[in-house]
Image (spheres, rainbow, N blue to C red):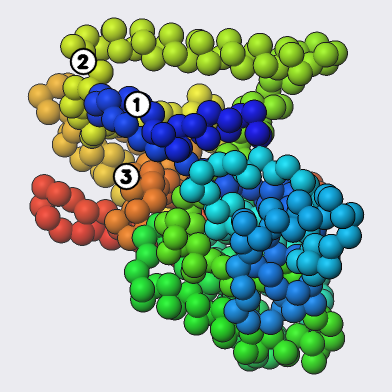
Amino acid sequence: MSLVLQPLIDAGRHSKEMGCADGYLRRVHPILAAYIADFPKQCLVACNKENRCPRCLVESDKRGDLEECAWRSTTDTLKTLRRKQRNKQSRKFDIQGLRAVYKPFWKDLPFTDIFACITPDILHQLHKGVFHDHLVQWCTSLMGEKEIDVRFQAMTRFPALRHFKKGISTISQWTGSEHKEMQQVFVGLLSGIVSNDVLIVARALLDFIYYAQFQKHTDVTLGAMQDSLKTFHEYKHVLIELEVRQDFNVPKLHSLQHYVASIRALGSADGYNTEYPERLHIDYAKEAYQASNKHDYVEQMALWLQRQEAVCYKSAYLDWRKAGKCSPLAERDTVSPAYYKVAKVPPHRQVSVDRIRSDYNAQDFVPALKHFLSSRSGRQQVIQPIESDQFDVYNQLYIETGPSSITGRGPCLQKIHASPKVAVRGCKAKIPSHFDTVFMLEEDHQHIRVLVPSGT
């Protein structure tokens, strides 16, 4: 890292002319302002042991308490490391829980406080850590694995919510998506089987997780976020009374104390989420390794990545030339044209009209289809459907929309499901019918039409 960041030392002190996105040349002072890493790497960068906090000087047995502690200081840490290197003994070195990294890469970087640069890690600290490794395990200890699975299976199906039809004990590969899908129903799942105090603990942690993912914050949201953390610490004693935990000296639980300060200093934690670069493990490591001959693969992987980058640049240049733009900075239309894609093989082929009426309860299918075709065809002649026709039928429809007006996230993928029940087939269990209710806004008539599945 010292070699990689070496150019920042001179540029940060004396500035450097750099081309900006708007085409202008500006003199800037590039500095290291944020360092995104998981907990072991955070401790290595901060030169402290993993039983300590990389941001503050909290004692190893006090991390479970909601107490303000002094921040680590770059000047003091470097002095302590130099003293330890010279004398081999340093009481302060042991008290602060430092490790023998005598020449950290950040020691010469200008205007850099490495401890303040360490960012929250939503994926590893919240989704995988606080929620999956701790909260879910605590509740499983109280309820039992079988009861957890039964309650996930019994949850009512609802659009945009995942239904864990086999529970969660059978999931072998966990990602941030599974964690977020579990969080959406977890409080309701606990209701009625755990005590009110345990329910408050779970709700407080989940509230904190959701607040931490906001893309925009105000004093109100940050205050609510801190209140959620205080509520957790106020009621956490119930887990000790139920013998689920002996203490709360957990690094990931302690890290929640620094979220508000970090957001105020560096911006929303969503911008530093390691879930986004986690995908690069596949693009830059796994695929590159698969492209090698598995011998002396490091050099081959580097060469493969260089070639991929060259192809990407060339493709972007050719796309620009084909578009016929005079300037790469020309204003572009931000609205993409609508399009659709259809799967090559439908789940149900050559389904008769009678079966559509009986299985899908679509009594007006043929008249509705005729009306749809005539309203969309204009003056063009189309073949009108008749009762003897057969149709290919799909179980679900995906509609991709723009960013959500509520969360700002996007694009949003809406799924509309319509499938009849399937009877028992050999050793396969029966599958119940699944029909979603759809709200449609017709712009031509400025009113909302509600499509409710018949017979459900």
Please state which amino acid type lies under the numbered disc 1.
Glu
Q: Name which quarter of the figure residue 130 lies in.
A: bottom right
At 79% from the left and 87% from the top, the residue drawn is 240
Q: Where residue 402 is drawn, which disc sits there?
A: 3
In the displayed structure, does residue 89 sit left or right of residue 72?
Answer: right
At 80% from the left and 11% from the top, the residue drawn is 293
**Spot occupied by residue 294 in the image (x, y as percentages of width and height):** 83, 16
**Spot occupied by residue 239 in the image (x, y as percentages of width and height):** 76, 85
Q: Where residue 327 is drawn, which disc sits there?
A: 2
Q: Nearer the viewer, residue 339 or 389?
A: 339
Residue, disc 1:
17
Please state which amino acid type lies under the numbered disc 2.
Ser
Q: Earlier in the sequence, mark 2 or mark 3?
A: 2
**Spot occupied by residue 150 in the image (x, y as percentages of width and height):** 73, 70
Q: Earlier in the sequence, mark 1 or mark 2?
A: 1
**Spot occupied by residue 104 in the image (x, y as percentages of width and height):** 70, 44
In this view, the mark in front (2 or 3): 2
